[in-house]
Amino acid sequence: MGSIDSLIRKNIRSLKPYSSARDEYEGEAAVFLDANENPWFAPLNRYPDPRQRNLKRIISELKSVPAENIFLGNGSDEAIDILVRAFCEPGTDNIVSIDPSYGMYEVTAAINGVEFRKAPLAEDFSLDAVAIRELVDGNTKMIILCSPNNPTGNSFSQGDINELTGWFAGILVIDEAYIDFSPHSGFLPWITEGSTLVVLQTMSKGWGRAGIRLGMAFGSTEVVGVMNKIKPPYNINMMTTREAIKTLGRAGEVRLRVKELVASRDWLREQLGLIPSVQKIYPSDANFLLVRVDDADSMYEFLKEQNIIVRNRSTARGCANCLRITVGTPAENESLLKVMRNYKIKG
Ligand SMILES: *Cc1c(COP(=O)(O)O)cnc(C)c1O
């Protein structure tokens, strides 16, 4: 307990959180005149549950994690922002992460006035523990990793993470946005009481619900407690909650779609490998492929002219001439291949 408490920003440690009407009375009264709501237009006239109990109960069962170890955010982007605000003192503390990875970590650190340090990945995009260790100092409150990593697609091993937790006493965040596509089981089972590990997941990718904005953070009771303390009280709205519950109830169907996408990804890899302008396709545990081509800018423009948009990642470290291609429907994948096969004619 003591060790996590000492990681929390001073002003947050002493913060007395806002107590909403729905926090102060949680029973099943017949008449609610406590929150200045309009009595008409039910049910959306009411504020949503600030503790998201129903939704957390379902996620808890699905993930085998107690509800008190779950934080829900308006996308994982909100969870990342809240983690930075809970633990990192602006102007003093720093965050160490990896390069290349998801751009939001650096932006969020910058918005919060927190120094962001990037340890290059090895050439094969594996974790370089020495590079990370070199950047960590007494003011490093947080290490952020992403596994499977975006945009590289690879996962980090249990050995890699074990090595880090062996010596790093701050908050270790592992973003598992793509875990549903991965053969690895991920790091949820590593969260124990008193641990400083935070695992992020989301409904935006495998669950196919990017539009509802629901991110999940899993951590020890203390870490989740401080996140809940500083979140906006009603950050998960009723429509998101309702749609999330519906989608989580169709877990079997969603799993089948994920399996299909993984099969499509492997098929797409084979097909892309036959195209002469494709130089290398990196291994992927996610729903995208990082593909090195002869000339990424020109291929990107060529695809765009045919109304196919991929992500040009050529300016990311170690990703020269790389496009990040999301796996689509079989028809979309065929359209992509058709255009890419024609590329040599133009080039
Ligand atoms: C897509 C993605 C997310 C999802 O963020 P949401 O805010 O939950 O939509 C998180 N992390 C990474 C690395 C991603 O690529």
Image: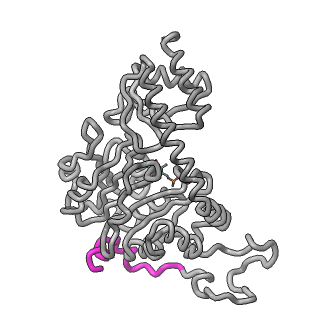
Position of 82 relative to 15 (above/below) = above
Residue at point 53%, 22% (across, down)? 301
Q: Which corner quadrant of the image does residue 291 belong to?
A: top left
**In the foreground, 18 or 150:** 150
Image-based side of 252 in relation to 223, left or right: right
Residue at point 23%, 58% (across, down)? 164
| In magenta stretch: residue 9 | yes
Q: Where in the figure is residue 213, as x and y percent of width and height?
A: 58, 57
Q: Where in the figure is residue 69, as x and y percent of width and height?
A: 43, 73
Position of 27 relative to 214 (above/below) = below
Q: Which residues are magenta?
A: 1-18
Q: How is the structure coloured here? A: one colour
Position of 218 relative to 259 (above/below) = below
Image-based side of 190 in relation to 295, left or right: left
Image-based side of 113 in relation to 96, left or right: right
Residue at point 24%, 53% (across, down)? 160
Residue at point 26%, 75% (across, down)? 3
Q: Which corner quadrant of the image does residue 242 belong to?
A: bottom right
Q: Quadrant of the N terminus?
A: bottom left
**In the foreground, 289 or 295:** 289
| In magenta stretch: residue 91 | no
Outermost residue, top direction?
Answer: 345
Count of numbered circles on the image: 0
**In the foreground, 222 or 103:** 222
Q: Where in the figure is residue 34, as x and y percent of width and height?
A: 69, 85
Q: Where in the figure is residue 268, as x and y percent of width and height?
A: 48, 31
**In the foreground, 1 or 195:** 195
